[in-house]
């Protein structure tokens, strides 16, 4: 953490921020109970790397990027994890006489002296950034098996008293805490706890891919499930019906919410926990991965005061994240925005957010009806699942409101026929729908390790059946992607492949995800031609005529840019 004078000096001299502006930032930071530095970094008012590089130069210490270092586990463990986390200090290299430290506060002399005495080596100080420290701290939890010590576990019966007792035993508490915390460090979106005949399998979904992380003995099964039920305020003696709940934990000063689903299965009860970061800010349309033309189409249609904006795709394709990004654009003090969600995944200031409650009968349809009596300008409904919700949403769009929602269809063109299947008249659909965004999520290549490659024969042949090469060459040119002379076909076109040795990419060569999109604006031509007999193929032809970039082309463009791979594009677009 930089001292106030250093931060203010750099803000003025490097980022050209005036004294008055800094004072206003201090007031806003105080209201949010944050330091000035945390506020400025959180609001992206200064660039973190530039800030700390400049600070390092002024403090006469070297600057280090830990993400570019391969840190050996025995070196990392020279500093205990509790010390590393509390004091934000990392050991990244070692010699017989010296220990190389990356930290945020080079004036923490007491801790530096402690490390010198503990290790018997001279500390060599380096300044780094909070993000680099946070990312490297996850390496302390690189192996879940090492975090969990299974001791004194006995077979637990299913009586209420015994389950409650088991859930409060220290070994079970430690196991569940480790599973949850490790999922946070792994950037997992979901945790699966699955009972088998002889053990309990724990799997994480990371960047959309499920992977096994460990198997626990069968004797832990009932205690673990009971512990999760207690955390979620669920009935621990109920084993034959599904249950849903949620709870929160705090890891490294960050709050995380877990949405819990428990269902009975053959060998017991299966638990799935959806992990949600409570402090996540909505991404911009550019950060989502929308290409310039698609981004411009969405921004233009959002200026319409009424109508429907629909986002489609399968479960886990990022639809809700896209809706929140759109809400971020629309969320201004002069409009009233209400949402009904299942569940509320992100809390956003300035928006009235409600959650579906099956027990009280508060459904999407009832929520929309209630919103219409709340003087709304903009409404978001988590999903259009049935005819009743669809009818109310369309009625709201017809009467001067902007309605945002999601649907489960494979592509943008399939959305309009899907609404007809729900019993909505074609003329109402075409006259109220402004734009449809279809999307998938692909894993992003870790930039430093992306390796140039050409496609395998089978991949090239499969792609050739899905696209038109003339269209592809035109799109690549439009997006300033230059081709070499020999790149005349898919077979000799250069793409990229992951290098799975990268530490920061969790040994997969991928890190994070990005969207591929298909943005269909409902123009007058589409609206006028839409009838009950209009098929998905008819709409695709009209979309192609007006220059809509389909998801497969969007994905290939990103693959050619080195953002993702053709493997990923084919994985998520195969129908």
Image: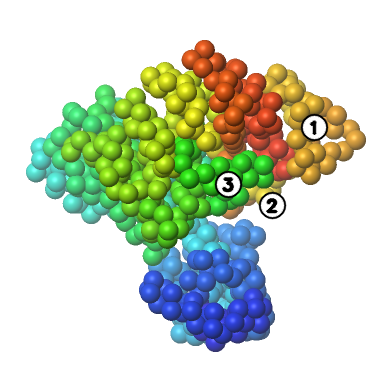
Q: In this figure, which colouring scheme has been used for the structure?
A: rainbow
Q: Which is in the foreground here, disc 1 or disc 3?
A: 3
* Residue 438 pos. (x, y %): 54, 33
Q: CA distance from mark 3 to mark 2?
A: 33 Å
Q: CA distance from mark 2 to mark 1?
A: 27 Å
Residue 513 vs 31, above or below: the answer is above
Category of crowding for the residue at label 3, using alpha-carbon neighbours closer than 10 angstroms: few (below 14), some (14–19), many (at least 20): some
Residue 74 vs 295, above or below: the answer is below
* Residue 125 pos. (x, y %): 59, 78
Category of crowding for the residue at label 1, using alpha-carbon neighbours closer than 10 angstroms: few (below 14), some (14–19), many (at least 20): some
Q: Which residue is mark 3?
A: 299
* Residue 91 pos. (x, y %): 55, 69
Category of crowding for the residue at label 2, using alpha-carbon neighbours closer than 10 angstroms: few (below 14), some (14–19), many (at least 20): few
Q: Residue at x 59, y 25 (%)?
A: 526
Q: Which residue is mark 2?
A: 448
Residue 534 disc label: none
Q: Is residue 137 visible?
A: yes
Mark nearer the N terminus (3 vs 2):
3
Residue 473 disc label: 1
Mark nearer the N terminus (2 vs 1):
2
Residue nearer the viewer, 430 or 214 = 430
Helix, strand or loop at label 2? It is helix
* Residue 538 pos. (x, y %): 60, 17
Q: Which is in the foreground here, disc 3 or disc 2?
A: 3
**Residue 91 in the figure: left or right of residue 493:** left
Q: Residue at x 41, y 46 (%)?
A: 378
The quadrant the C terminus occupies is top right
């Amino acid at each position: 953490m930089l001292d106030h004078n250093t931060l203010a000096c750099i803000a003025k001299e490097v980022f050209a921020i005036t004294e008055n502006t800094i004072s206003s930032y201090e007031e806003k930071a105080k209201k949010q109970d944050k330091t000035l530095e945390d506020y400025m970094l959180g609001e992206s008012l200064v660039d973190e790397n530039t800030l700390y590089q400049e600070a390092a130069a002024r403090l006469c210490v070297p600057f280090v990027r830990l993400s570019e270092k391969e840190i050996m586990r025995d070196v990392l463990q020279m500093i205990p994890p509790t010390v590393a986390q509390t004091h934000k200090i990392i050991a990244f290299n070692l010699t017989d006489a010296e220990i190389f430290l990356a930290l945020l506060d080079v004036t923490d002399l007491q801790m530096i002296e402690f490390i010198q005495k503990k290790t018997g080596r001279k500390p060599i100080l380096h300044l780094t950034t909070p993000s680099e420290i946070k990312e490297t701290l996850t390496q302390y939890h690189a192996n879940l098996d090492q975090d969990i010590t299974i001791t004194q576990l006995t077979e637990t019966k299913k009586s209420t008293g015994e389950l409650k007792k088991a859930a409060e035993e220290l070994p079970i508490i430690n196991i569940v805490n480790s599973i949850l915390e490790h999922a946070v460090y792994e950037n997992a979106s979901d945790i699966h706890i699955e009972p088998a005949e002889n053990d309990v399998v724990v799997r994480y979904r990371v960047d959309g891919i499920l992977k096994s992380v460990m198997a626990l003995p069968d004797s832990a099964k009932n205690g673990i499930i009971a512990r999760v039920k207690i955390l979620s305020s669920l009935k621990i003696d109920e084993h034959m019906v599904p249950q849903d709940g949620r709870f929160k934990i705090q890891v490294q000063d960050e709050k995380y919410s877990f949405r819990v689903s428990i269902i009975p299965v053959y060998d017991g009860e299966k638990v799935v926990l959806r992990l949600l970061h409570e402090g996540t800010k909505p991404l911009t349309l550019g950060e989502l991965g929308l290409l310039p033309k698609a981004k411009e189409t969405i921004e233009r249609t959002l200026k319409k005061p009424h109508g429907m904006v629909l986002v489609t795709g399968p479960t886990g394709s990022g639809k809700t994240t896209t809706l929140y990004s759109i809400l971020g654009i629309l969320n201004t003090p002069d409009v009233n925005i209400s949402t009904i969600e299942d569940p509320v995944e992100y809390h956003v200031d300035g928006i009235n957010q409600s959650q579906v409650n099956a027990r009280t009968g508060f459904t999407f349809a009832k929520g929309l009806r209630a919103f219409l009596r709340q003087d709304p300008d903009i409404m978001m409904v988590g999903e259009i699942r049935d005819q009743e919700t669809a009818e109310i949403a369309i009625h709201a769009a017809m009467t001067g409101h902007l309605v945002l929602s999601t649907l489960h269809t494979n592509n943008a063109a399939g959305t309009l026929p899907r609404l007809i299947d729900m019993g909505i008249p074609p003329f109402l659909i075409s006259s109220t729908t402004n734009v449809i965004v279809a999307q998938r999520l692909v894993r992003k290549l870790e930039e430093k390790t992306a390796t140039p490659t050409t496609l395998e024969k089978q991949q090239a042949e499969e792609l050739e059946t899905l696209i038109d090469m003339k269209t592809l060459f035109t799109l690549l040119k439009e997006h300033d992607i230059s081709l070499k002379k020999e790149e005349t076909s898919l077979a000799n076109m250069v793409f990229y492949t992951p290098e799975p040795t990268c530490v920061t990419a969790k040994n997969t060569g991928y890190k994070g995800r990005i969207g591929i999109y298909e943005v269909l604006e409902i123009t007058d031509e589409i609206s006028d031609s839409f009838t009950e007999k209009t098929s998905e193929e008819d709409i695709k032809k009209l979309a192609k005529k007006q220059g809509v970039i389909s998801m497969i082309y969007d994905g290939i463009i990103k693959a050619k840019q080195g953002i993702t791979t053709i493997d990923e594009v084919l994985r998520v677009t195969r129908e």
